[in-house]
Amino acid sequence: MSEVLQADGPAAGEAILSAREVVREFRMGRSTIRVLRGVSLEVRRGEMISVMGASGAGKTTLLNILGGLDRPTGGRVFFGGEDLYRLSSRRRTVLRAQRVGFVFQAYHLLPELDVLENVLLPAMALGGRAGTYSALRRRAEELLLSVGLGDRARHRPAELSGGEQQRAALARALMNDPEIIFADEPTGNVDSETGEQVLGNLFRLVKERGHTLVLVTHNREIAVRCGRTLHLRDGRIVDEEVHGGGEV
Ligand SMILES: Nc1ncnc2c1ncn2[C@@H]1O[C@H](COP(=O)(O)OP(=O)(O)O)[C@@H](O)[C@H]1O
Ligand SMILES: [Mg+2]
């Protein structure tokens, strides 16, 4: 539990996130493509869920909508009881910064900042609310240690390997002690051994710290390490598999 922010969401096992008939269309010139055609799902606190689907199925679109990054064309998303897209964009931004962590396939570290500064960024987004600079810096350094990058804090992202950059991105996602972490094919850009290190860190930290995880992957071996797998096809969740107990 962080000294920085105290989560006050629902208790373990209760729904932390729910989507109701989410639709997302994109207008392309005169035509409209309907990527999500009514997705409903519920994520309970402390769960690890994977989302599978072919390339182009809408996995990233869904993750962005669930995480407050992209407004759906229809339907609703509730986060800890808040109707996410009925909040003002300012309140949604604060909610996202405090309670949501993202890990992207392509890391998205800022190249001109060093690793420590990248990890600190989410706390900076909260201004003074996140804590004193020295406490935040200590937390960022601890997070870097916990992902095996204690000695890389002052390096720029370009000086790190892909797997190291992704572990830095994981530390950044954890900086504000989010209730839920969305990881979008986090091992999609690294070889399988390096991917295993990234996943090992991700699963361990999610478990140790009691986060909730929604993980997009097209790798079945990875998907089944979560407690449940949702399958996205033709804009809908067409299947749900429950796995024995979840990973490590
Ligand atoms: N901003 C956008 N504008 C237009 N089309 C988009 C946009 N974002 C995604 N799409 C389209 O939506 C579909 C699903 O994309 P995406 O969610 O990235 O799939 P996945 O992550 O499952 O590979 C694709 O056909 C993609 O081209
Ligand atoms: Mg994608």
Image: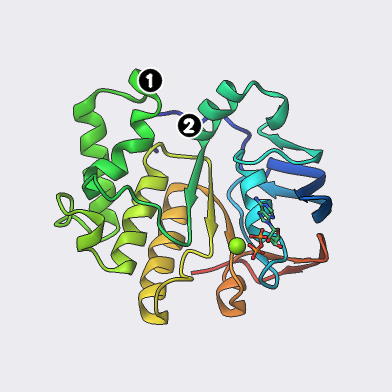
205 above or below 20? below
Q: Which residue is mark 2?
A: 98
The image shows residue 133 at horizontal and vertical percentages of 22, 26
Find the residue positioned furthest to the front.
29
Q: Which residue is mark 1?
A: 129
Residue nearest the viewer, comparing 15 with 134 = 134
Q: Is residue 208 left or right of residue 82?
A: left
173 above or below 205? above
The quarter holding residue 66 reads top right
Q: CA distance from mark 1 to mark 2?
A: 10 Å
Q: Amino acid at mark 1?
A: Arg
Q: Quadrant of ligand 1?
A: bottom right
* Residue found 66% across the figure and 33% down from its top: 80
Q: Amino acid at mark 2?
A: Gln
Residue 3 visible in the displayed image: no
* Residue found 33% across the figure and 68% down from its top: 163
Marks 1 and 2 in Cβ contact (< 8 Å): yes
Residue nearest the viewer, comparing 202 with 77 = 77
Residue 240 visible in the displayed image: yes
The image shows residue 139 at horizontal and vertical percentages of 26, 39
* Residue found 24% across the figure and 44% down from its top: 113
206 above or below 79? below
Query: Is the C-beta of the residue carrying label 2 under 8 Å from the nearest atom of ligand 2?
Result: no
Q: Is residue 220 left or right of residue 211?
A: right
* Residue found 55% across the figure and 74% down from its top: 222
The image's colouring method is: rainbow
Q: Is residue 204 left or right of residue 43?
A: left
Name the image quarter holding the N terminus.
Answer: top left
